[in-house]
Image: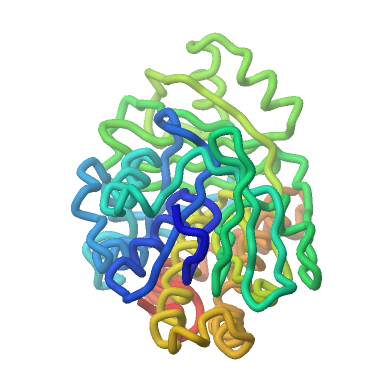
Amino acid sequence: MSEFVDVLIIGGGPVGAALARSLADAPLSVMVLEAKSSPAADPRVLAISCGSKLSLERIRAWSAVEHATPISTIHVSQKGGFGRAILTAEESGVAALGYVAGYHEIHSALISGLDPEICIEGACACEIDLSGDFGAVDFDYQGKRRQISARLVVMADGGKLVEHVKGIEQHQHEYGQWAIIGQVRAEKPHLNTAFERFTPEGPVALLPYGEGFSLVWTARPEAAQTLLALEKDEFLEKLHEHFGDRLGKFVEVGPLSGFPLVLRYSQPIVAEHLALIGNAAQTLHPVSGQGLNLGLRDARALAREIMATPIDDIGSSGMLSNYSSRREIDRKSGIHFTDSLIRIFSNEIPALRAGRGIALAALDCAPPVRKWFSRKMMFGIGSQSIL
């Protein structure tokens, strides 16, 4: 194992692996430290935007994702109020607005194309020193403490390490909500339609996946615990009552899990010899499915900046400043958009309910606005984020 590399990536999840894949053909030494050792299959399901799919195609990873379900239509509505909006791939001029695939399949597609010596599993980064000519990271591996230095250290994960980086502040807001996730099947077929339904307790999303749906049900903590404790038939009845009759009754549900929701973001996203991407830069509410897609755009932008920089200047303040400025508009817009959706829609204020209905109805009656909105959701905000 080398003790010096040009680029050291902490976190071997989809975003960190995507960055490593993006740099695979560059004349650079790259290493990925992944804390998990031989991780078990992750049951989560991810929403991949059209722009992210194009990005994964460019790094030759998408062809290995064989079980992705395309989203041709997105249906947005609010419970207990009028107004709805329908976005379609045809209107936006794309084959699909996005795709739904298993986390494990996407991650495996990215990791499988890397040299096994590049990704070190079971390596847990524990300390970082950015005060020297290069970044230095201490990590535990096979029962021993080791250190590796790099021109540029990239954190795709490792939020606890970020807390100790001078000059970077972590901001956090707890939503007082939990997300319940799992797979469900309804009486009616999904027809490649994704549903986002806003309720006072939080949004409920149904994403077409295989023959059924991937469910993300947002609820207050006490309600989430109650729902998770229900028998399957009771849970399906509650979901039908909560979502409505658009898909008929829900007839099948797989294993369910839940976790608290929080907005967490770092500011700035660079320091001496250090860049943040993905979850280390921002962790978003799952509404609208922007978290992973924003992280993949981080990885794409940083890869471009690295490859456009002379090797001796990788990790320099100039290079990092360029990366930070290129990501500012898209990143801040993504954080503000998802946070605003929750603040505006997760309440029972009558005036806001009426305003939400008017906004949804206006969006549905304005094709140019719908197309603009869809493309920003697919490709990000700002010219530097369009892939």
- In the image: residue 113, left or right of residue 220: left
Quadrant containing the C terminus is bottom left
The coloring applied to the image is rainbow
Image quadrant in which you'd find residue 213: top left
The residue sitting at 71% across, 53% down in the picture is 127
- Report the number of numbered marks: 0
Compared with residue 48, is residue 80 higher up or lower down, i.e. above or below?
A: above
Compared with residue 97, is residue 253 higher up or lower down, i.e. above or below?
A: above
Q: In this orientation, which residue lies closer to the viewer: 237 or 28?
A: 28
Residue 364, visible in the rendered structure: yes
Question: In the image, residue 179 lies at what x, y percent?
Answer: 61, 36
The residue sitting at 78% across, 57% down in the picture is 163
Image quadrant in which you'd find residue 323: bottom right
Question: In the image, residue 65 lies at what x, y percent?
Answer: 24, 47
- In the image: residue 169, left or right of residue 365: right
Residue 359, visible in the rendered structure: no
The residue sitting at 34% across, 62% down in the picture is 21
Q: In this orientation, which residue lies closer to the viewer: 326 or 16?
A: 16
The residue sitting at 40% across, 43% down in the picture is 207
Question: In the image, residue 360 lies at what x, y percent?
Answer: 54, 63
Q: In this orientation, which residue lies closer to the viewer: 116 or 183?
A: 116
Question: In the image, residue 20 lies at what x, y percent?
Answer: 39, 62
- In the image: residue 262, left or right of residue 1: right
